[in-house]
Amino acid sequence: MSGRRIVSIWLPQFPMERWQKTQERRGNAPPDDRAVALSVEGAHGPVIHAVNRAAHLAGVTVGARVADMRALCPALKVDFADPEGDRIALHRLALWARRWCPWTVADDWVAQGAAGGSQGLILDTTGADHLWGGEAAMLADMEAALSALGHSSRLALAPTWGAAWALARFGPVRAICADVASLPVAALRLDGETVLLLNRLGLRTIRQLADLPRLSLARRFSCAGPSQNPLIRLDQMTGHLPEPVSPPGAPPVFRADVRLAEPILDPTHHLPALCAALCDQLAKAYRGARRLCLTVYRTDGEVSRIEAACALPSRDPAHLAFLFRDRLERIDPGFGFDLISLEVPATEALGTRQTDLAGGSDAGLELSHLVDRLTARFGRAALAQLQPAASHIPERAGARAAPLAAAPDLAGPQAERPQRLLDHPEEIRVLYAVPEGPPAQFQWRRRSYRVARYQGPERIAPEWWQDKPGTRLRDYFKVEDEAGHRFWLYREGLQGDGRGGAPRWFLHGVFA
């Protein structure tokens, strides 16, 4: 056996309890003594998927046909089950269970005809039990918290996933590393046909199965999948075959929690302490936060999150707390939450920084703080910087990029361009043009301009690899009128170039 500690939580009535809570919210909850069952479509008509206590006492069994059970219990109320909704709710509950440890997954394995094949949770609590006063106290706390949510549960702790799963469904209450050899073979997470076959062979317990020669079992189940191969399941239970707990998102290395004795509705007062504790962890590892996630765990089982990002790695507690200041009101507190968690999913290396000799602050750091605050207030799409792109066409020579992103290193000198480029070049009316030169006089936006000085032309050819056939070249001129206004205009095409009629003139930019 390994040194790991895996907790399996079995929720035997999860679909029915979820249905009952939905009916209570709608005001349609049936009385406790009314037999109720949920059904799903089967191969030969609807079959029973889940039952309440009254239906169980009346003899209604899961997996039986609805028509047969109605003959047995005429007063049976049948409603449609929602397996997909149950699956989504179970995965949400797995995230809520991270209050005990960061490695949690939903265990929704259900074998056809297998006993105990119901929804549950798997938690890797290795090294986390001391936070709860020991393993027994941790299991008791889990059971109490789930009971407060309205879920009945059975829990067990063992060194492997398979052993914990078996003890939760077939072992004693809140079993901790108990003996699994005396449990039935169904505790190996086998499907119903395999369990029936083993029972016909006289193999009813795990001990009887383990005492058999492995070679004979390997030959019999050589082509079977995991849910049909007793050897694979036995090796997973004993730890000879690894079965790690892999949550959908790996838990962050840096995390700070605040556990509250009573539920609250506003996490504002606890945020500075969380940021300070998190920055201490980052400082010891010489890391800085790039992305943060504030999570609140509500008492009704829901989880709410707010994410923030930094333009540059930071471990300034005041700055990190400010990123959430105007966004906490977006959290729906419900009936309150009793656990607040601040995590850092993405970090970067950040060494110790020293201010200048005059005692001033780092101007680059102040700029990054400004960018972070504007992004937190207006969103990521509202802030950007213009960077050069690999193109000599003016409208393609610049691209929007994230604030403070490193500019690409483009070879060669960059030509002077006006500070303001029009979104689309505007056609101008030329009253008189110098041959092979700029207009001597032109009209733009109903106003006439007489050219006093000019510089050019600068010829820019089309980019044949992306421009349409027949695209004409451009001759750009920098011109200045008599009042000192400077413009950037171009002539599109040449006379007699075979790509259209007479050349056209456009104004593309204005110099400051």
Image: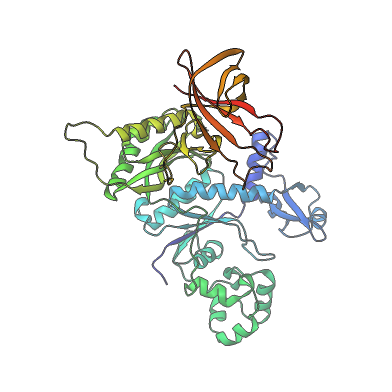
Q: Quadrant of the N terminus?
A: bottom left
Above or below for 315 versus 234 = above
Q: Quadrant of the C terminus?
A: top left
Q: Position of residue 248 (x, y in %)?
A: 52, 54
Residue at 71% of width from left, 51% of height from top? 55
Viewer-side residue, 166 vs 492: 492
Viewer-side residue, 391 vs 261: 391
Q: Is residue 298 left or right of residue 323?
A: right
* Observer able to see residue 262: yes
Q: Is residue 216 left or right of residue 469?
A: left
* Observer able to see residue 270: no
Q: Position of residue 291 (x, y in %)?
A: 42, 42
Residue at 58% of width from left, 54% of height from top? 11
Residue at 32% of width from left, 40% of height from top? 315
Q: Position of residue 25 (x, y in %)?
A: 64, 35
Above or below for 91 versus 317 = below
Coloration of the structure image? rainbow
Q: Is residue 321 left or right of residue 307?
A: left
The number of callouts visible is: 0
Viewer-side residue, 101 vs 412: 412
Q: Position of residue 332 (x, y in %)?
A: 52, 32
Above or below for 214 versus 249 = below
Kindly give the residue lying farthest to the left in the view shown. Answer: 357
